[in-house]
Image (cartoon, grey):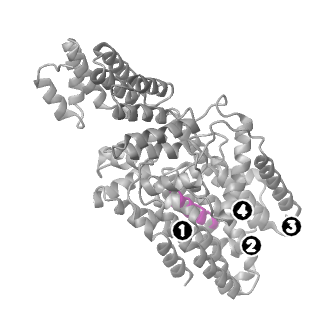
Amino acid sequence: MALALLLGATLMAFAPALEAGFVSFDDDQTILLNEDFRGVDARTLEWAFTTRHMGHWQPLAWLSFALDHAQGGLDPRAYHRTNVLLHAANALLVLLLSARILALARPSLARAPWRAWGGALVAAGTFALHPLRVESVAWVTERRDLLAAFFLLLSLLAWLGCVEPGSGKLRSRALWFASIALLAVSLLAKAWGMTLWVVMLALDHALLARGMGWRARLLEKTPHIALGLASIAIASWAIRSAPDVTRGLDEWSLLQRAGQAAQGLVWYAARTLDAQGLCAIHELPHAWNPFEPRTFASAALVAALATLAFVLRRRLPLLGLALFTYLVLVSPVLGLQQAGPQFVADRYAYLASIPLGLLAAGLLVPRAAPLSWSTSLVLAALLVPATRAQCRHWRDDEALFARVLAVHPESSIGWQARGNMLLARDRAVDALVAFQRAVASNPRNWRAHAGVGDALDRLDPAGRSSEAVAAWTRALEGYFPPWIVRVNLANHLLARRGDLAGGVAQYEAAVREMEARDAYWTSPLVWYGAGQALRAAGRETEGRALLEKAAKDGRTRERAMQALRAPPPRL
C-alpha cells in the first residue's frame, strides 16, 4: 500500500514536467545542438565513454539520452518522461531503504509493520514530493542526478542486505559484489557515490554495531573507497576541459569558500523545511565579503547542532547519524572546490535530503501508527501542489528566467538570459538594457558584454560601431570559447566598416584559438568564415584550405562545397 501511495503521489507531483520543453540553460548544448549522442551504435558508445562534453564525464547519461532519441527524436516529452520515471523509481528505493534503516534503528518495528511502513512513507515522501527535487527532475540536462542516485541507492541496499548486524561477517558475498558493481555503474552517471564508503562506515558505527575494528571496516570497503577516489580523479579531469568553470584561490579565497560552505549547510536544510525561493540559479556573488552576519549565524548554528548531536549521542543516536550523513552527502558540492556560477543549487539537495527525512520519520515511528500515516497525507497535501507549481517554472526559457529574476532581481545570469531572449525576438533596444543590467550586476559576465556588442550591432550598426567593438573586445578578456566573439567582431568589421584587414585578422585569431583546443570545441563555421575572408583578401590558397576543412563537417559541408565552386567573394 505504501508503495502504491508514494508512486501515485510522485507521478502527480511531477506531471507538469511532462509538458515542459527544452530550456537554453544547458539543454541546448546537451541535446538540441549536440548530434554526437544520437544513435544506438558503437560510435555513440565510444563517444559517450570518451567525451568530456561541457566538463562532465557521464557515459551512462549519454546512453540514456541516446535511447530517448531513438524512441522520440527531439520531442522533449520523451526525455522528461524518462526523468519522471527515474525519480519515481528512486522514490520507491528510498521507501525501501527507509524501512530497512528504521527497522535497524528500532528492532521492535519488526512486530509493528504498520508503524514501520508509516515512518518509511514519511521519510520517502519528504524526499520524493519536495519542490527541491524539481531541478533534478524537470531539467533534462540533470538526468545524471537521477541515474546516479538510482544505482547508488541500489548499491546501499545491496550492502545493507549483505552485512550482519552485530557481527563482522557478511551474509552474502554475492550482495557484497553487487554493491560494488552498482556503485561503479552509479559513478558512470555522476560522481556522487564518491562518499558512499563514509556513509557505510557511519552506519557500521552508529546503527549496525558490527563489533569490527576500524582497520577491518576500512578493509571491507576497499573497493568502494577505490571507486570513490577514482571518481574524484575522473571528475576533476573532466571539469578541467571546460575553461572558466572552476575558480582558483585568487578568484575565490579559502575564507570565501569556508563561508559559502557554512551557509550552504544551513541553506539546504532550511529549504527542506521551508521551500521558498527555489529557482534555476542562485548566483555566486561577484564580490562577496564572507564576514557577513549570515555566515557567522550559519557557522554558529552548525556548531550548535554538532554539539547537540555529540551530547545526545547515546540518547538520540539517530540525530548524530542523520546530521553526519547529511554533511557527508552534501560536502562535495559545498563549494570547497568551486565549479560553476552557483553559490548553492536546488539540485545539490537531491541525495543529502534523505537523512533529514529519515530523522523526521525516526521521531514519529515510536508513536502510534496513525500518526505516521496521517503525517504522510499532510506532507502530500502540502508538497504536491508546491512541487507542481515549481515544475511550471521549468516550462520554457521565459518562465525559467522570470522565476530567477523574481527570486534574485539583480541576477547577472538572469538578465543576460533575458537579453538573449529579447534579441532572438528582434527587440534590440530592450535586449541592450537587459545586457547592460547584467554587466552592471557582474562586470565579469563576459557573455553579457558580448550581448551588449550583439545588441548594438543590431540596433545601430553604423552609428554605434565603436561601442559594439569595445563591448566585444571587453568580452574577449574572459569569454570562452573566444572565437565565437571573434567571429561576430570580424563580421562586423567586414560588413559595417569595410575593414578587410581587421576582419581577416580576427578570423585568423579565431582559427588559431579554436585549433589549439581539443576537437570537442571545433566549430566549422569558423573555418568557413575565415576561408571566405581570406579569399576576399586575395589569399586564395589559404582560404580554400580552410573551406576544405569546413566541407568535411556535416554542419557546413554543403555551404563550403558551394563556396569552393564559386569565385572569391567581394567584401
- The residue carrying mark 1 is 387
Q: Amino acid at mark 3?
A: Arg
Kind of element beneath mark 4: helix
Q: Residue at x 31, y 13 (%)?
A: 501
Q: Residue furthest right?
A: 311
Q: Earlier in the sequence, mark 2 or mark 1?
A: 2
- The residue carrying mark 2 is 105
Q: Earlier in the sequence, mark 4 or mark 1?
A: 4
Relative image position of residue 357 (x, y in whole percent): 67, 68
Disc 3 and disc 2 in contact, CB within 8 angstroms:
no
Q: Amino acid at mark 4?
A: Leu
Disc 1 and disc 3 in contact, CB within 8 angstroms:
no
Q: Amino acid at mark 1?
A: Thr
What's the CA distance linking mark 4 and mark 2?
10 Å
Residue stretch rendered in magenta on the structure: 148-160
> Main SS type for the magenta part?
helix
